[in-house]
Image (cartoon, rainbow, N blue to C red):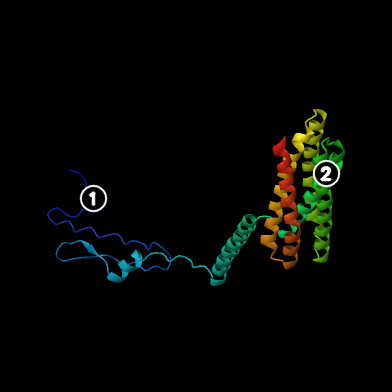
């Protein structure tokens, strides 16, 4: 005969149902609500307020209005700067830069006509070149006067134009020197100077369109017809060769 367990109920008596162990709250300060069994199913039910509490989403932290407006302002400023840079790049060089470039090109043409005049062998071409040298020198002085009168003193743009034109002059001068050494200067010179005068006219046309200046319009109307006349004379000479 085995000794009777003092915690075991006497034989013949029903075993009492096990009592559920009370659960501790999941967080400090949170009131634990014990589930209540329903009469029909015996399943545990919870109060509606408790279910709403545990199902409620956690609210995100909102940005302070000052911070939000600062971020929006920063984005707008960055967009404005990008738009300004885009517009400036699309607009091309300024009128002052174009004026200095035209002045530098005139300097090149005057210099070339003076240098190559003694190398031309045909009298007619030499006479045309002499006229071209005189007219471009006069145009050079008129443009310099226009720049001074209208207060153009952009030394940076002037230096940049001069630096670019120096390389251009060197290449053009070398072309004429090579033609002179091979005895073809009288054929090369007219066509090359027609090209150079056409480019100069195009530069002046762009300045006229951008400057919107009555004084520059006067300069243009006074000198461009002379350019056209020189182009016609050089082209006519070239056609006879």
* The furthest residue to the right: 118
Residue 179 image offset from top left, x and y in percent: 79, 32
- Residue located 31% across and 71% down the image: 49
Quadrant of the snapshot with the N terminus? top left
Q: Which residue is mark 1?
A: 5
- Residue 153 position in % (x across, y down): 82, 61
**Quarter of the figure with the C terminus:** top right
Give residue 82's mark: none
Residues 145 and 43: in front is 145
Count the marks: how many?
Answer: 2
Q: Residue at x 20, y 61 (%)?
A: 43
Task: State left or right for residue 161 relative to residue 92.
Answer: right
Please state which of the two labelled residues, at mark 2 or mark 1, is closer to the viewer.
Answer: 2
Relative to the observer, which residue lies in front, 102 or 24?
A: 102
In percent of width and height, residue 234 lies at: 74, 43
Q: Quadrant of residue 28?
A: bottom left
Name above or below for residue 96 compared with residue 124: below
Residue 203 vertical placement versus 24 (above, below): above
Rendered view: 2 above or below 181: below
Q: Which residue is mark 2?
A: 127
Q: Nearer the viewer, residue 218 or 45?
A: 218
Give the quarter of the image for residue 52.
bottom left
Q: Please report contact status of discs 2 and 1: CB closer than 8 Å, yes or no.
A: no
């Amino acid at each position: 005969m085995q000794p009777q367990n003092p915690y075991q109920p006497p034989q013949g008596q029903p075993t009492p149902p096990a009592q559920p162990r009370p659960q501790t709250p999941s967080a400090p300060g949170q009131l634990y609500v014990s589930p209540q069994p329903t009469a029909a199913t015996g399943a545990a039910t919870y109060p509606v307020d408790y279910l709403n509490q545990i199902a409620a989403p956690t609210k995100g932290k909102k940005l302070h209005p000052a911070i939000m407006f600062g971020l929006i302002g920063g984005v707008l400023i960055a967009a404005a700067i990008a738009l300004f840079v885009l517009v400036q790049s699309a607009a091309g060089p300024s009128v002052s830069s174009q004026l200095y470039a035209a002045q530098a090109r005139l300097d090149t043409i005057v210099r070339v006509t003076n240098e190559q005049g003694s190398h031309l062998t045909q009298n007619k071409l030499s006479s045309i070149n002499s006229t071209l040298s005189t007219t471009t020198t006069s145009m050079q002085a008129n443009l310099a006067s226009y720049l001074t009168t209208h207060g153009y003193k952009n030394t940076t743009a002037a230096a940049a134009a001069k630096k670019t034109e120096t390389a251009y002059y060197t290449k053009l001068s070398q072309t004429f020197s090579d033609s002179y050494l091979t005895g073809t200067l009288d054929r090369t010179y007219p066509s090359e100077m027609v090209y150079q005068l056409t480019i100069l006219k195009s530069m002046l046309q762009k300045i006229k369109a951008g400057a919107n200046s009555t004084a520059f319009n006067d300069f243009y109307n006074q000198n461009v017809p002379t350019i056209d006349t020189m182009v016609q004379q050089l082209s006519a000479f070239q056609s006879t060769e």
